[in-house]
Structures are given as C-alpha cells and as structure tokens.
Image: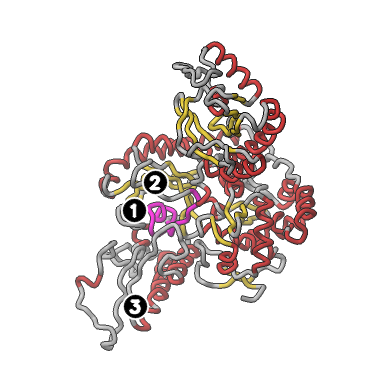
Amino acid sequence: MPSNVAPAPGTGTSSAAGAEAVVPAEAVTPLIRGIAVLRRLTDADGVSSLSGLERSTGLARSTVDRITATLARRGYVRLDGRDAVLAPRLMELGNAYLAALRLPRLLDAHADALADELDESVSLAVGDQDGIRFIHQATRRRAMSLSFRIGDLLPAERTAPGPLFATEWGDREWARWHERRAADPEDRGFPAVPARSRPIEYGEDDRNDEKDRIGAHRTNRANRTNGKDLTVAQDPTVDRDLTVGKSLAADRPEEEPGAGRSARRLPTLGDDFEQRTAEAREAGWALDDQLIEPGLVALSMPVREAGRIACVVSVVSHTSRHTAADLRDTLLPRLREAVAAMERELREAQHAESATPTPRAAAAPSGLAVWTGASKQELGREFIESLARGLTVITAFGEGRAELNLTEVAQATGLARATARRALITLEHLGYVTAHDRVFRLTPRVLGLGFPPLSRTSLAEIAAPHLTELSQRLHDSVSLAVLTGDEIQYTGRVSTSRVMSVHITIGTRLPAYPTALGRVMLADLPEPPLTELLPLTPRTITDPARLTAVLDRVREEGYALVDEELEVGLRSVAVPVRERGGRVVAAVNVAMHSSRRTPEECVAEVLPELRAAVGRIEEDLWVAGRFRRVPRT
C-alpha cells in the first residue's frame, strides 16, 4: 500500500466498504502505526507475539519493536518474552472518553439496580457509526452469562439497540450501512460476535444484489423527501417474509443454478433491519430475538437527552429463562420506569450544570516534556516521541472537558500548538475524534483501543506482573490475598526456588488474625472479627485487647509485620491494597524464613520495595476500576 494511503476508518476491524482513504499530509505516521498495533492487540484479546504483530500489521519487525518499546515505556503494554500484552494503564484512553461522555457516572447505578431487581444482565450502549458499542455491563454470574465487554462493537442490525439508533440515521448513515454489509458479508469486522453466514450466490445478478438494494433504498429516501412516504408494505427494499431462520425459498419453486436464470439470494441475519427500524420508530422499543447467537434475547429502549438518543439500555436474557415475546411482555413496563428515571437523572444534571456554570476544567499538568525527554534519553531511537505525544492528546479530554479547542488541548498536554494540531488531524482521520466549529470531541471508537479485553481484568491479573517483579528483586516469596470473613484467601502467588521457601497455593485459606496479610485488612474494618483466637505457635497473640492494640498500630503505620505467629520460623511483612475510594480490598506480603532477615531488616530493606510495588498495583487498579468493578479474584 502506498505510504500516503491507509485503510479508511470503519466500524469494525476493517474499513466500512473496503475503500481506501488518503492520509492527510500533516498526519503523524508513527501515531497511525502505533494505533494499528493497539488495535491488533485488542483483536487478539490482549496478547500477541511480536512476530504476529509484524504479520497482522504489515509493519517491519524493527518498527513493531520500536512501537511496543514506546508503548511499554508509557505503561500501555507489557513485554513478556516475545509477547506483547496489553496493560491496565491503557484503559486511561477509554476512561477519557467515558468521563467526557458523563453517561456512566450518571446512569451506571440505575443500570446496576435494574439488573439486581430483575436478576438479568443489563447493558448501556451508544451508537458508533453503523454499529453499537457498550459503555456499561451489569452482568449476572451464571453458568451461561453474557460475555460482552465494555467497548465491544456489534453490528447494528444484529442487536436490539441498533434499530433504535437507526431511527436517527440519515441518507449518509444508511448508505454507509449498505456499503459495509456488501464489503463485509460475514461480519468479520466485528470480532465480538459470531460470523454471519451468507448462502452461496450464483450469477451476476446476485453479485450485484446489494448494489440494487442500495439503489432501491436511495430511491425510497428520495420518494420520502418528495412527500411519498412509503409504508413498510410498499417498500421494495423490505421483504415482509424475512425472518431469522426461515428461507424465502421455502415457498417458492426451486431454481437450478445455471438453468438460464440466476438463483435468488437467500436472506441472512440483518436483511430485515430497515423493517425493524421502522417498527422501533413506531413502538419506541426493540427486540433482539437470537440475532447474535442462538439463545440470546434482548429488549431495548432509548434514553433521550434534549430530544436525542443519548444511549440505549438493554435487558439481556437467555431463552431458557425468557422468550423474546415473554421478555417484552414481562419486563417492558419495568424497563420504561427505569428509562424514565435515567432521563430524569440527565435532566437534573443538565439543570444543575446550567444553574451553576463553571469554567471548563483544566487537565492536570501532564509533565509530558520531562517524561518524553527522560524516555528518549533512556531508550534512544527505540522511543517514538511522536507516538507518545499523540496518545497523550486523547487523555486531555475527560469530565468537564468533553469539548476542547486546539489551544485547550495544547495547554492540557503541554504540547506546542503545531504538534497538538497534527495529532488531532491524525486522530480525526482515524475516527477517534470529531471536529465541529474548531471544537474537538472524542468518539466511542476510543474504547476499541484495548478496553474490551482489559475490562474483564481481575485484581489478581493486575497484580501478577508486579508480584513477579517484586519477588525477583527481593528473592523471596510474594503473595496477594483478600479477606473473606475472618480468613484470608490467597489469590496471587510468586514463589522462590530456594531449598527453604514458603509454599502456599492459590486458593489456600488461613485465619486472618495471625498473618500479616490478615492484619492489614482487619485494621481497615470498623469492627474486625476477633473471636476464636487460637494459639498456633507460642508467639501467637490470642488476647483480643492486645490484638486490637496491634491492629490500631497497623492502621497508623500502614503495614504489619508478623514474626512466627502462624508458623515457627515464618516471618512476613504486608501492606494493604486500596481502591480509588481508599477502602482496603486486598493485601500483598513478602514472606521468608526468619533466618533470612531480622525484623529490623524487613522494615528497612523489604518494606520500601513492597510499598513501591503496591503503589504500582494501586495505580493500575485505579485506572482499571474507574468505570467498572474489578473482580478481586
């Protein structure tokens, strides 16, 4: 492909129509290439070998190495041997979009409450060109549960939200949809859904079938514009008999291919999308009756703000629990109430913002110049400064900063106006920002940069590389644990290969009171359970009053050191792991034989390294948990 040409930004992983778009002369090529690598890693569920990235992007291996080195320096990927792995820090790009959007902050609690009440999965989605993209998932934990993730992109025609968003489409959006359907007949550009099968077609007439449908659709639009509003029954682009799982050929005589006449193309998923859109416009709600995959059903309603669809809320179930009709008849009244509450929330927020206007919030100083300078000095030519700067532009947006002009982006990032302008031109070309009247906004496509695979990351997965690094640095066993009642449960573990080392497997439960891990978590509770304090060794503290005093000291000092209270010869120091709000959700310890270090040496040598590692875990946790609940295990 010529250097001045790149795939046109489409809705899926490929372009909407397989066309090519000319890259603006001022676009930043390293930024284009870096985003291509991030997209390929996202499509690969977050992990790919470097040679795999070389093949999938078409970039030279040296270029892939430089891009991944830069992304690793930024904290967006982790290099694990020959593999590149997406890191939780990358989610700050999607967080910038979600914060600017406001909807998750205002509506997530409503969706969660609805899911709890109905005991069904509930999602919020926004439109993304001719697809829909999830911005929130409240999923029920079942053997068969919804596997979609925040940021996943689905084709509009195979969802319940799609027809609702399409009620606001114009000619341009419909044309894009038809072109994408023709260019991607199996929905390969949407990795989150199973491929759409299309029957074999015969003859030139069938190859031109989609073009004919586009022409018919445009004729219909023109007729509507001229006052000839066709009904669904009169619309030649809609077949009244189109239903999922039924063949139009069933009631027609069979026609042999090559018998002088072209075989008629059989219907596929989504062919009735325009009809479903017309029905959604009239009803105000829409159904998905197993369009994505057998067994999955959904009921959706739009949430409007200022007369336009802000997002769509969906209740998702399985046919083992509800048929589509039953889902509609049973849950539609409650869904209407939830939507009314969400719209009221948006109106009140808008009123509050209008009543007390505040200056547009400024982004925190990024220190980008200092960081890029240090990175360039450390990595040399392996560090691509223009890529790091371009991605930083995305983080300039956020809550109170949904719309920024060029000057504001430059101020927020510390970049020169010319540099910020080139980055914005590149991001607009790729579809990650839109520009109107010299004001820029992020688009939902930003969520496609790593958010889907990372949105299911657990605390144990976030901590794992940091535990490994800490164990290698100290040459001692390192563990992560959570509190379950009056016990601790190990959820992460890195052991050493010493002859004498601490061997505990993931999932092991131990009493909390005689462990350093347990004490830093008990100290965060207003009333820690201190019953049944049994003497496990001669040094185990069993007096409740004395243990309470120990927990008070742990709370004040921020760490716990336990010396031979769980087992003779075992010494351990632990630090709590806190979520964004400050609540302790887990703890990390370093354990060793008492002959390895004295208690004083543990405090002087181990504790600083332990605190630094936990600080890095918390930084990743706070990014990953800003708009979702991070599972502890």
Say which residue label 3 marks.
201
Spot the residue most to the bottom.
260
Separation of residues labelled 1 and 2 (CA atoms)? 10 Å
Camera-nearest residue between 35 and 237:
35
Camera-nearest residue between 609 and 401:
609
Q: Are marks 3 and 2 in contact (CB under 8 Å)?
A: no
Asked if one can make out residue 308 in the rendered structure from this viewpoint, the answer is no
Residue 190's spot in the image, x, y percent? 46, 61
152 in the magenta segment = yes
Residue 425's spot in the image, x, y percent? 68, 61
**Number of on-image labels:** 3
Residue 240's spot in the image, x, y percent? 27, 64
Q: Amino acid at mark 3?
A: Glu
Label 3: element kind: loop
Query: Which residue does the image show at 55% across and 37% down from the upper left?
Result: 350
- In the rendered structure, which segment of residues is drawn in magenta? 150-166
Say which residue label 2 marks.
314
Say which residue label 1 marks.
288
Camera-nearest residue between 222 and 558:
558
Q: Are marks 1 and 2 in contact (CB under 8 Å)?
A: yes
The N terminus appears in which quarter of the rendering?
bottom right
Q: On screen, 409 above or below 170?
A: above
Query: Which residue does the image show at 57% across and 26% down from the upper left?
Result: 520
Choose the circle earlier in sequence order: 3 or 1: 3
Choose the circle earlier in sequence order: 3 or 2: 3
Q: Amino acid at mark 1?
A: Asp
